[in-house]
Amino acid sequence: MSLSAFFSEFFKLMTPETLFNAFWATGFGIIIGMLPGLTATMGVALLTGLTFRFATDQVIVILISVYVGSIYGGSRSAILLNIPGTPANAATCLDGNPLARQGKAGYAIGLATVSSAIGTFFGLICLAIFSPMLGDIALSFKSWEFFVLAIFGIIICGNLTAPKDPLKGWIAGIFGLLLSQIGQESIQAYARFSFGVVDMTGGLSLIPVLVGVYGVSEIIGVMKLPVDYTVRTKVARILPEMKDIFKYWKTIIRSGVIGVIVGAIPGVGEDTAAWISYDFAKRGSKKPEEFGKGSYEGLIASETGNNACIGGAIIPVLTLAIPGSAPAAVLLAAMWLHGIRPGPLLPIEQPQFIATVTAIFFLATLSMTILGLSFVRPLVKVLQVPRNILMPIIFTLCAVGSFAINGRMFDVKLMLLFGVIGYFMRSNDFPAAPLVLGFILGPMADENLRRALILRGGSIAPFFTRPICLVLWAFTLLVIISRSPLPGLIARLIRKGTKKAA
Amino acid sequence: MRKSDIIFGIITIAIAGAFGVMSLMMPWHESEWGVFAAPGLVPLILSVLLLQTGLILILRALYAKGFYRSLAELTAKDTKIMEADEDGTGANKGQGEAMKSEPGWKRISLTIGLAAVYVFLLLGRLPYLLSTGLFVSVFIFVFRGGGVIKSLLIGAATSVGVWLVFEKVFLVVLP
């Protein structure tokens, strides 16, 4: 993708309508991100339904702006309330809140804003560079590769989103895959698991399921807590000094790289990116003891990582039609809804789309930075709305968002059902991300497996002889084996062996 | 955790069994490509995988005590990191304690119950302004967000606001 393509797309965005949409959507995203209980995924899913009638190009602007805004916005409540606004900002609490308690809330917010902007920008550059590269490789993906990729995605997503207990992650993933099989299948149009109900024949729509699992389940979780939160810290100077940013340039680059890589892994999103960035920053820091007590470096690492993840998550969306994170999954669904077909054929069918997305990203970064540095105090007031009032309002928005796409109450009921399912799953350590990833990848896995078998008359040899498949199988096995008792056994055998030799 | 794992393991196996049986009841040889194009193929494979993982979950919950001990240790370490409250201002104590206290079953069932009434009984049958206004007002009132007047006002404001913004500006169909 050439610079000229980027610039021409960017100038096309300079219309009053687009700029207005970008700004209000980013602001909306920041507020959604800021409010604990409302996640980026939910914000993007909500707006997907609500902007269904808008023109496609405006929808993409709005959704990317909300995405960027909400991942950034969560840092506010993390700093001021010690409650992450979205899971992606959990690592920000560790150093952001101590800074606020030292009276430096405004400065922490400013640091978070600049780090988020740098992170998003880094992710954007990687998106621009690596999407065309991956796109070339993606063109050689055939049915076999897509099937093995789906398996790999579920395995690694389950592993990374449930680090203490990946078995539960894998169960969630398989359950998601199974749920996606409901409805008419693509090869013979046989209506599976529909029980004769017309609504089920069409399958379960993605947006109601997403809004349910990420939105309604959070609402239930928020309502469970009897205590409300109070903002007690003062907000003074906001704009960070340049020297504080430049001092930690290594951390910034490292967190950016980690963010993009984690983002590119299917289904593993901004929360994991933030934690891994934080962890590596702590290990590589000259002053690790400051982490957890108000270290600028820790705050920068977390916020740069989670925002860089956005760009990384969109890379597989555009090139392989596989979501790199949950909000990216919604973005993918929205693209499908509006007739864009991401995937290996995107550079052929719509060659300027990657440049468009990059330009929109840049616009979102700019509006996020401007809004983030200017409207600090008024936005903080939003945090003081009691949750008993906020949650029912959000629920009605969820209902409208789920209803808006297909216009049927079935979707709203589905949303509530998955809200309840999602809540009980998450309160028992079953992560939601593999469920959603499985739900999205299910049709892809199903079609490609059967097509591959039909093409070669039932032979499963190509699954194990094609080079890309072999690489993916190797990674999958690596992940499974690393979580099994095997490495521990081998380590013990080696230790016994060296003891005997000594 | 072990008890809930056993329950979830049973649920998982039940779901796997149900989907598996239903897949077997689908036509298997109807197309010219035979089994490979059968609609039940992938669901059956997935059901078997789900059955296996559910079984592993139950067996682990019943027999692997060491696993749950190390899990508890890891969780304790995480909660210590997340709840560090060093200057003891108690500003965040409330949150932490609330998390550790009673599961809040009453609040959860109330939330789900009210939402279910809204989705299943009110929406779609009553005009949108009425159904939404009622839901929001009752919800706020039940959860002591305000008195009768305040709840009704906020409820009305929400439904009118949503109706205005979404039907007029976003051109979205409301239930």
Image (tube, coloured by chain):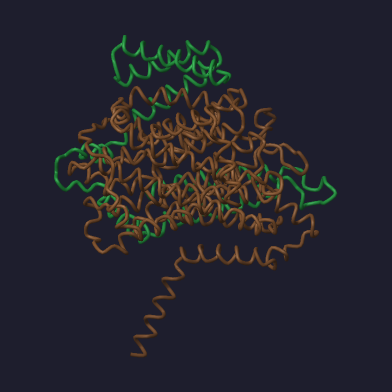
Q: Which of these two is toward me, A360 or B117?
A: A360
Question: Which chain can be seen in green?
Answer: B
| Image position of B124 with respect to A456: above or below | above
Residue A200 in sight in this render: yes
The reply, left or right, for residue A379 in relation to residue A402 is left
Vertical position of residue A31 compared to residue A155: above or below: above
Q: Is residue B17 visible?
A: no
**Taking A66 as reference, is B17 left or right?**
right
Residue B96 sits in which quadrant? top left
Image coordinates for residue A335, horizontal then vertical, percent: 61, 38
Which image quadrant for residue A28? top left
Total tally of numbered discs in the picture = 0
Q: Colour of chain A?
A: brown
Task: Give the x, y percent position of residue A220.
Answer: 40, 32
Q: Nearer the viewer, residue A487 or A265?
A: A265
Residue A78 position within the rendered picture, expressed as x and y whole percent measured from the top left: 30, 41
In this view, B174 is above or below A240: above
* Residue in the image at 50% along x and 52% along y: A125
* Nearer to me, A28 or B143: A28
Query: In which quadrant is the C terminus of chain A drawn?
Result: bottom left
